[in-house]
Amino acid sequence: MKEVRKNRGGARRKGRELAIQALYQFDKKETPLPILLSLDWVDEKVPQAASISYFRQLLEGTMKNLEIIDQTIKDFAQKYEFNKVMPIDKAILRFAVYSLFFEKELPAVIIIDEAVELTKLYGGRDAHKFVNGVLDGIRKKLVEQGQRKGSE
């Protein structure tokens, strides 16, 4: 059943998966952005152009706004030390927070659902609950501030 979910979403889903891998490499190995963007590190067949385009948008946007994204995660994950969050869970949170902030055309519930599904596939045990809680808290704050619609 996980295999079906993994393939859901086409180009955007593949772009998100590549972004997770790149953000993980950045966190674990401090791989520079130009190398991450080159996709030279990808072991599998190079994905379609739409996936690559979305991957680059996510990665560049996340890295450009990393300081505010990380601070936001810290603010909403107060029970957890940020440096102790598993790197894969941190990577998923980072791209999802970027998406909540800057991809206004995507409903927040879709962004959160996708992040939770990816965490179930790649993250630590029960990490999806943590990711869901952090992202939903951020979503509520954005709604309060008028940056997102309440119906999303």
Image (spheres, helix red, strand yellow):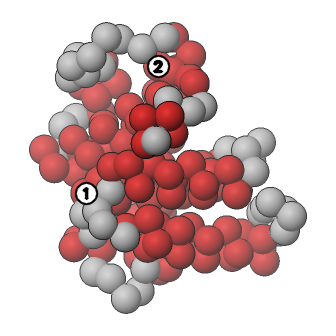
The CA distance from mark 2 to mark 1 is: 22 Å
Q: Position of residue 72 (x, y in %)?
A: 49, 70
Evaluate whether residue 71 shows in this view.
Answer: no
Q: Please state the horizontal and vertical placement of residue 75, each as a whole percent of the image.
A: 47, 80
From the viewer's perspective, tell me whether residue 70 is left or right of residue 48. Answer: left
Quadrant in which residue 128 is drawn: bottom left
Q: Residue furthest front?
A: 1
Q: Which residue is mark 1?
A: 87
Q: Image quarter for residue 143?
A: bottom right
Using residue 135 as the reference point, say whether residue 60 is left or right of it: left
Q: As shown in the figure, which amino acid type bears the numbered disc 2? A: Ile
Q: Say if 102 sits above or below 48 in the image.
A: below
Are the two marked residues, 2 and 1, in contact with CB atoms closer than 8 angstroms? no
SS type, badge 1: helix
Question: Which residue has dot 2 on it?
Answer: 52
Image-quadrant location for residue 84: bottom left
Residue farthest to the left? 29
Q: Could one spot residue 137 in this view of the protein?
A: yes
The quarter in which the C terminus is drawn is: bottom right
Provide residue 76's location: percent of width, then percent of height.
49, 79
Sequence order check, earlier mark of 2 and 1? 2
Q: Mark 1 belongs to which amino acid?
A: Pro
